[in-house]
Image (spheres, helix red, strand yellow):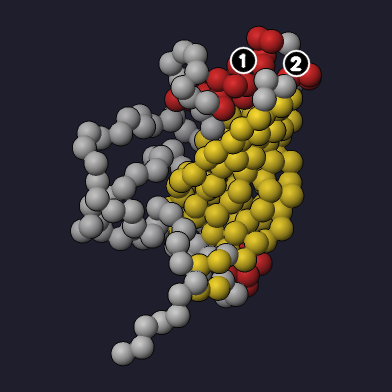
Amino acid sequence: MAFFGAAPDDTSPEGPSPSVPPWRQPPGGEIPVPVAAGLILARTPGAVLSLRRIDAYSIGCSFRLQVDARHDEVDDDRWFDIMEALDHRLGRRRDSEGKMRLGVTLADGRSATSDGGWRMEPPDAEKPKGPVLSMNHRGGGGSDREYSMGYRLWLWPLPPAGRVTLHYQWLELGVQEGSVELDGGAIREASSAATPLWRPRSR
């Protein structure tokens, strides 16, 4: 059975929202503890999708993904298709079904996807039960011969001990649905060593 169903409409509502709650991004006042990953998730002509590492924070964890592309591996048409997949500002209107899709299934059976995108929320937003999965950072660069794009996927709260299954699919890039199993216990153990940047204020 496929993990991903139909992609939702990700059109953002009009008007800015005033705050970013902790379930949408990592805490800014911590140094996380990296958990080694170093896994190739998929290879397609001209591009490789990999999971570089996991950063464990006190309240959640982020998955660091990267796409590395090389023009020498493909013709010009395929290279443009790759660049279009990596940069939504290029080319034709994007197909929601073809974009990068990511999800997790936790050891207790709960699951979440990043299909809803990243957004700010009003200060009185109700705290969700979780898990919440958000793609909240991307950035890259390169040349007309090689290009890399990195992504940060935030999972809140920390997963329970046991298996964490990371699901992925990116049809525009030629990546069919797949998954990889990670260790939730190792993530939780690392999170206990996250370092606060600021000392508690004395009263």
Q: Position of residue 182 (x, y in %)?
A: 66, 55
Observer able to see residue 44? no
Q: Amino acid at mark 2?
A: Val
Image marks 1 and 2: residues in contact by CB distance under 8 Å: no
Question: In the figure, 84 relative to 23: above or below?
Answer: above
Question: Which one is in front, 38 or 4?
Answer: 38
Judging from the image, what secondary structure is the residue with disc 2 in?
Answer: loop
Q: Crowdedness of circle 2 by 10 Å Cα count: few (<14), some, many (20+)?
A: some
Question: In the figure, 203 relative to 109: above or below?
Answer: below
Q: Crowdedness of circle 1 by 10 Å Cα count: few (<14), some, many (20+)?
A: some
Residue 152 relative to residue 174: left or right: left
Q: Quick one: which residue is furthest to the bottom in this view?
A: 203
Q: Position of residue 183 (x, y in %)?
A: 66, 61
Q: Amino acid at mark 1?
A: Phe
Question: Which one is in front, 130 or 26?
Answer: 26
Residue 24 relative to residue 165: left or right: left
Q: Residue at x 47, y 33 (%)?
A: 5
Q: Which residue is mark 1?
A: 80
Question: Which one is in front, 33 or 164?
Answer: 33
Observer able to see residue 63? yes
Judging from the image, what secondary structure is the residue with disc 1 in?
Answer: helix
- Dividing the image into 4 quarters, which one contains the N terminus? top right
Question: Which one is in front, 153 or 110?
Answer: 153
Q: Which residue is mark 2?
A: 74
Question: Which mark identifies residue 90?
Answer: none
Q: CA distance from mark 1 to mark 2?
A: 10 Å
Q: Position of residue 87 (x, y in %)?
A: 52, 26
Name the quadrant containing residue 22.
bottom left
Residue 182 relative to residue 12: left or right: right
Name the quadrant containing residue 171.
top right
Question: In the figure, 89 relative to 30: above or below?
Answer: above
Q: Residue at x 31, y 90 (%)?
A: 203
